[in-house]
Image (cartoon, rainbow, N blue to C red):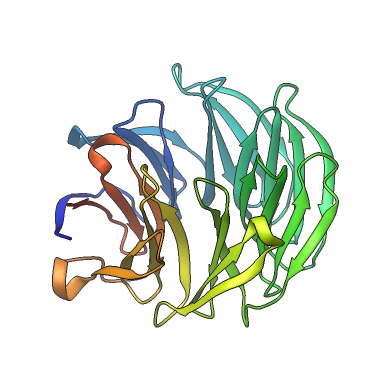
Amino acid sequence: MQVEKIDTFSGHRDCVYTLERATESSQFFSAGGDGLVVRWDLLKPDAGELFAQIPASIYALCLDETRNHLWIGQNFEGIHLIDVDSQEEIASIKITSGSIFDIKIYKNIALIGLSDGTIVVMDVESFGIKKHIKASDKSVRNISINPILREFAVAYSDFSVKIFDLQDFSLKLVLNHHTNSVFSVCYSPDYQYLLSTGRDAHLKIWNAEEGYQLQEDIAAHLFAINDIKYSPDGKLFATCSMDKSVKIWDAEQFKLLKVIDKARHAGHGTSINKLWWSQYENLLVTASDDRHISVWSLI
């Protein structure tokens, strides 16, 4: 595998915490500690566009493709709903006095993970709160939805991954094999496996089709693993870490294929917080505490 750094996007004035797809396959959004939401185009690397500005750090963005709305999680306040075409704010709601770590949308339901351990379930159409799910006092860090099994997985800072029913929101299962905060969960594209990572620097592979049996436990990085993302074709996945590296893995064998770091590829110099894998030319995008966004070609 050959790795080439295609571009570096700069413009954020603080750490970049999150990336999200945009409506065009070559475009994506970024946000972070400066409260700026920027829209980038991989075809026009020098033309970042200020999309929105929020007076607090942003850890979570989610595109509602059906309605072409961007959900923005403002720490200490709540959710801002922005029309992507007009860039106008349609609605906002205060749902917390803490941090919002993740937003996921499935059909007409939005699942919002908060720093106090609550998952807020919102109705997308009415933009109203339907339910609060409280299964821990520690932060909800990440959510991944499995529409085949009709359930969703949640990464918690209480060292657990919890599996909930997607219809009645009941707690179905608790996975306790991590030894520190769990930061990311991600179902494989075929929904057979659930991957989880966190502060213990381990990558755990769970067989979702067989009751979430632990299939692999890999000491994957030196420090906390912040995110996991699959490639568009599902053949690869990437992990990124506080150890300043991105690792590329074979999705079938769970074998390490490539390490992207500063020494070998002029990678990031600080913690890498988020990944986004574009369908446009299979480019991998990484966001870091160094305030930069890097774009990688893997051939």
Q: Does residue 219 appear left or right of residue 257 in this picture?
A: right
Report the side of 265 relative to 166 (left or right). Answer: left
Above or below, 6 relative to 250: above
Q: Could you say which quadrant of the image residue 183 lies in?
A: bottom right
Front in this rendered view, residue 119 or 218: 218
Q: Residue at x 47, y 78 (%)?
A: 218
Q: Is residue 120 above or below residue 256?
A: above
Instruction: Judge whether residue 41 can be spotted in this image.
Output: no
| Residue at image location 53% in from the left, 52% down from the top | 59
Task: Please name the residue shown 41% across and 26% down the image.
Answer: 23
For the image, the number of numbered tags is 0
Q: Is residue 251 above or below residue 269?
A: above
Q: Nearer the viewer, residue 235 or 91?
A: 235
Is residue 166 at least partly visible in the picture? yes
Residue 39 on image: x %, y % = 35, 34
Image location (x, y in percent) of residue 223: 43, 80
Q: Is residue 286 above or below residue 106?
A: below
Residue at the farthest top position: 86
- The N terminus is located in which quarter? bottom left
Residue 84 as seen in the image, left or right of residue 8: right
In percent of width and height, residue 95 lies at 74, 44
User: In the rendering, at what x and y percent does residue 282 appear?
Assistant: 27, 43
